[in-house]
Image (tube, grey):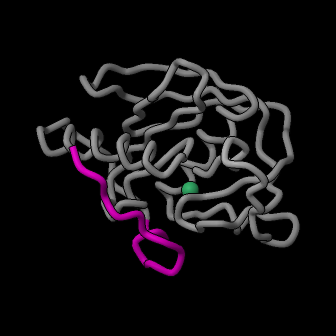
Amino acid sequence: MALRNIRVQGDPVLNKVCKPVKEVTPRIRELIDDMIETMYDANGVGLAAPQVGILKRIVVIDIYDGNGPLVMINPEILETSGEQTGDEGCLSIPGKAAQVTRPNYVKARFFDEDMNECEVEGEELLARAICHETDHLDGHLYVEKAEGPIHDVVYVEEDEEEEEA
Ligand code: ZN
């Protein structure tokens, strides 16, 4: 496993539409392992493959509830309901956050690392993370949906770090 460089806003790879994964090759398994390691190293709650420069439909998410990491290949949002508005950040836009409204509930279909079809339901932070990460796969960043100024994240204490995806 190895850390990969996280691409930052302005890198054109972040604005491209990613291709579906047809087969989980050893190289893709290595990519997924690296993405998980890179996400944890950056204290993120999610990371999408284009953020490490790979245009494939793969995301990893961990909201630190004990159930992660969640690896989603070719994720597709099936249902949403409700809404939540809150600060959202992104590992590709370090040190910044802005208010974004997302569905409060999301149901999504995806494939796991053995290409088994799976479904996940998430509320609150998990719903937000699924929306944020699947947006990356279509070349979208949260700042396009920001409802207020993009502001600096102020770190009060180490254990109160804002979650960035
Ligand atoms: Zn992001």
Residue found 29% across the figure and 41% down from its top: 32
Residue 52 lies left or right of residue 131; in this view the side is: left
55 in relation to 40, above or below: below
Residue found 67% across the figure and 61% down from its top: 142
From the viewer's side, name the closer residue of 39 and 112: 39
Query: On the rendered image, what quadrant is the N terminus found in?
Result: top left
Residue 7 lies left or right of residue 56; in this view the side is: right
Residue farthest front in this picture: 157
Is residue 9 located in the magenta-colored stretch of the structure? yes
Residue found 67% across the figure and 30% down from its top: 106
- Tell me where the magenta segment starts and ends, as one range: 1-16
Residue found 88% across the figure and 67% down from its top: 148
148 in relation to 32, above or below: below
The tally of labels here is: 0
How far across and down, in percent of the image, does residue 90 sit? Answer: 60, 58
How far across and down, in percent of the image, does residue 53 sit? Answer: 33, 65
Residue 161 lies left or right of residue 20; in this view the side is: right
How far across and down, in percent of the image, does residue 13 sit? Answer: 40, 71
36 in relation to 117, above or below: below
How far across and down, in percent of the image, does residue 84 sit? Answer: 85, 40
Tell me which image quadrant ligand 1 sits in: bottom right
Secondary structure character of the magenta stretch overall: loop
